[in-house]
Amino acid sequence: MNTVLIIATKEIRDGMRNRWVLAATLLLGVLALALALVGSAPAGSVAATRLDVTVIGLSSLSIFLVPLIALLLSYEAIVGEIERGTMFLLLAYPVARWQVVLGKFIGHVAILTFATVVGFGVAGLTVGTGAGGDAESWRAFGALIGSSVLLGAVFVALGYLISAAVRDRGTAAGLAVAVWLVFVILYDMALLGVLVADEGQLVGQQLFRYLMLFNPADAYRMFNLSGDGNVALMSGMAGLGQQAAFSAGLLLAVLAAWIALPLVAAGTILGRREL
Amino acid sequence: MSRDIIALDNLSKSYGVDEVVKGVSFTLSPGESVALLGHNGAGKTTLMKLMLGLIRPNGGTVSVLGAEPGSRAGRAARRDIGFLPESVAFQGSMTGSELLRYYARLKRAPLKQCAELLERVGLTAAAKKRIKTYSKGMRQRLGLAQALLGDPKLLLLDEPTTGLDPASRQSFYATLHRLTEEGVSVLLSSHALTEVEAQTDRVAIMNDGVLVACGTLAELRQAAELPVHIEVQVGSGEDAATVAAMDRSALRINNHAVDFNCRPSRKMALVRQIAELGGVVQDMEIHPPSLDALYAHFRDQEKRP
């Protein structure tokens, strides 16, 4: 077996052994199910299906939860192994440092994928079967799951970047919290604050939209809520969509860049680090 | 490339202003075993890290199994290196058997070797138990087992016997001898000098980042010119006086024993003279300088300007 896959397999086994897989799946599943059942009830006879409403609810949920789970999985993946001394022995094997980073990444993203697909899938199947969803809403739901995995991968990669750069686990934990706060909460609040204070004078709407593109969480939000279907209509983002929103391809490319760059940086930093 | 297993040439390594390895040159030939001696902080572990490519040198060159450790070729060469770090750390939630299988895969070693190695280090009964329940000695033996995966050509063992009880220690050295007979090259570090005496072909003494001496014990003794200690047992005070007259280094202990601290070059002549005394001498013991004494000699020699 390939070295990267050997390391990935070990991470997945670790995740199962320490109940990470179980905990993440249950957490996402229970919350998604609650949201789906409670949130979709009032949809009733509106044009949107219950599944559409669920997609809106779930995307708001996962924008908070998925980055958090991803960072918790990843923040100590490298610095923790260095502190415990296990990295020392691992690197004495015929293993390159980038292979360690990539292998861990594949393993952790696999865990996240499993938790998201199963957790959200159960909720989707519960409300979406029968009259609950049509082909279009299923497509939106599939896009939600796929983009949630991508969002998770972004924060796994950011977690590794932190983990490869710091000296101890405590610092890594602090930085992980900071990263979560900045991208998930503060960035949008700051943008909003600037927009309000500025009253559209300096920071035009165009610039505002481009600034949103630089935050992976916002890219994820725009991808899921401002398409051209019922979801966009329901979420109140349709207006944004009509103002020539970014194409789905561009938003996915933003997420992909947010995965690749931190991952390469983490590999480079670990590669130069003296153990 | 040289055919040496390890070749260090004028190797230096600093952390900031702290120079921990200073111009070390050293070679290890195929099938040879060398003990690297020095107190804690002498640079033994740093030297091993340099050989494994875990850190980069500031000056000089390292070549291990014909490759530079930090390079791509060096990574491939690590398939033939078994390494046991000082106070080895494992993931406690894995079982001994799981851990060994993981490392075997990384080294492309046959998985059936895992059970054999666990047997060899006496961990078969604990193979299915989590490593966090292992004692320090068991962890150390598991560490040795992982170092032996994939039939390495070179073993780098950093303080391999710390935490081992005397029985495991003996079986460790027995394993080591069998491996060197099979042609495996070994570099082991230790600060327990008496223990490694006669266990390896050569000893290398490190002090403060400098390789102060390297050679067989006989060579080091010759170079150090430390006095040989000869103890002679006699029957009476009169005999003791006769024996003590043989050499200026004589030290009369009492009426029954005389000690000599003679120069190595004078040793054989003195022994012959004592033997010629015939019945006067009841018993005689010769002690060459111990490794401890040699170590102290070379260490202090370095300190003198």
Image (tube, grey):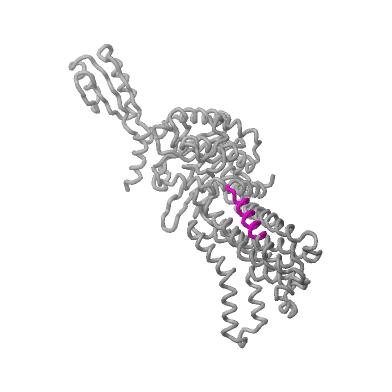
User: Which residue is nearer to you in this view: A142 or B93?
Assistant: A142
The image shows residue B87, relative to residue A107, as above or below, that is above
Give how far across and how far down residue B210 sits, in percent. Answer: 42, 46
Residue lying at 56% horizontally and 37% vertically, measured from the top left: B96
User: Which residue is nearer to you in this view: A100 or A233?
Assistant: A233
- Residue B270 lies in quadrant: top left
Residue lying at 67% horizontally and 48% vertically, measured from the top left: A5
User: Which residue is nearer to you in this view: A55 or B227?
Assistant: A55
Residue lying at 44% horizontally and 37% vertically, measured from the top left: B162
User: Which residue is nearer to you in this view: B208 or A144?
Assistant: A144
Give how far across and how far down residue B233 sits, in percent. Answer: 26, 18
Extent of the magenta region? A18-33
Residue B185 as seen in the image, left or right of residue A48:
left
Give how far across and how far down residue A85 sits, in percent. Answer: 50, 48
The image shows residue A85, relative to residue B239, as above or below, that is below
The image shows residue B7, relative to residue B197, as above or below, that is below
Where's the N terminus of chain B, which quadrant? top right
The image shows residue B259, relative to residue A96, as above or below, that is above
